[in-house]
Amino acid sequence: MKNLVVIVTVGLFLTGCATTSKFSKEQIQSGSVEVVSTFDDSSLFRPAKQSRSIQAAFNEVKELIKKDPNNAQNFSDAAQLYIMMGDNDKAIEFAKRSIRLDLDKADNARKILAQAYLRKGNKDLALIILNSLGGEESKDGEIHNMLGLVALRNNERTLAMSHLKKSLELDPNIVSARMNLGLVYLKYQQLDSAEKQFKDVLVHFPGHADAKLHLAIIDSQMGRYKQALAVFNDTLENDPDNAVALYNLAVLNNNTKQYGEALANLRSYLKTRRARTNSTEPAFALLEDIKLNIQKQQEAVAKANQKDGENAPAKNEPVRPVDSTLGH
């Protein structure tokens, strides 16, 4: 079955037998790109730091904090860098320190604080902060980007898309909002619209790996398996634990009847950190589908062997030449 794009936290065991899947096609396809994909809800660095590595920028900020421990902007920059490094707890700590140092100019630190809470799964606290920054009336594209994520995680699709589109109206250069909008389109199978958003990202950032990966997901869902396979393999060569690539490669393998590879890639996927924090049902659905396909394949082989056996001459019985006169 196609369009299986999800993450889970279970182990795989190819046991038992099933002639029909207990999961419906709708359940399998309910796995959302949102959970498996990297929702890029982080802001870009300030322009002066965009050309440097995260670690180099972080080392610079640490030195600045040592020299001036009362500079709120330095703590805000450190908090943003912790976001980029995936340390949400440290991001919260440094954002709060920045806010305490300069409450009157704390909007950026508060946005970072909302990002960190959103990444930790505390969407309610993130929403409180975002509303304090203007909420739906805000003229800040990054605020609407995060409001879109909150809405999406509340299954409010229309509201999510409204905020993400508003984000891009306010600032067309917010790459994270464009990625997020593409992911919403992809989640709800609006593939042409999703493809446009990811391609727009690549126009401005040709090396954007996540945009390339999600275009490959679209290729896979549209049956362009060769193109998708090349991107999935390239991604895993550089990042062997990439959950998005592993899962979607397993889906591609299943769709192209490479069931052993599908099972192996799904097992590898389930070992990733991302897989241990998400829903189990869609992955069980994919597992059931792989198991069912393997069983059908085995039954077809057994049936073919049985047919060959029935048509073969009995052992120790001499093969008789065909008498062309029989029946005359």
Image (cartoon, rainbow, N blue to C red):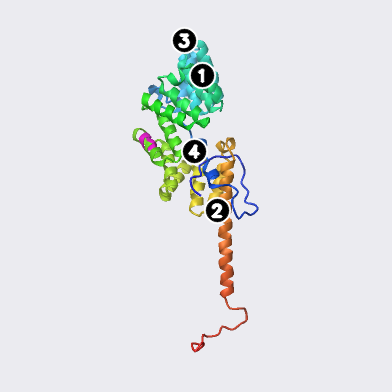
At horizontal 60% and vertical 55% (from top left) the residue drawn is 19
Counting from the top left corner in percent of width and height, residue 125 is at 55, 21
From the image, tell me which residue sits under label 1. 129
Numbered tag placed on residue 260 in the rendering: 2
From the image, tell me which residue sits under label 3. 104
Where are the magenta residues, as a range? 197-201
What is the crowding at mark 3: few (fewer than 14 residues within 10 Å), some, or many (at least 20)?
A: few
Q: Secondary structure at mark 4?
A: helix
Question: Which comes sooner in the sequence, label 4 or label 2?
Answer: 4
Question: Which comes sooner in the sequence, label 3 or label 2?
Answer: 3
Q: Nearer the viewer, mark 2 or mark 1?
A: 1
What is the crowding at mark 1: few (fewer than 14 residues within 10 Å), some, or many (at least 20)?
A: many
Q: CA distance from mark 2 to mark 1?
A: 48 Å
* Residue 198 magenta: yes
Question: Which comes sooner in the sequence, label 2 or label 1?
Answer: 1
Q: CA distance from mark 4 to mark 2?
A: 24 Å
Counting from the top left corner in percent of width and height, residue 49 is at 40, 24
Counting from the top left corner in percent of width and height, residue 13 is at 63, 48
Q: Amino acid at mark 4?
A: Val
Q: Secondary structure at mark 1?
A: helix
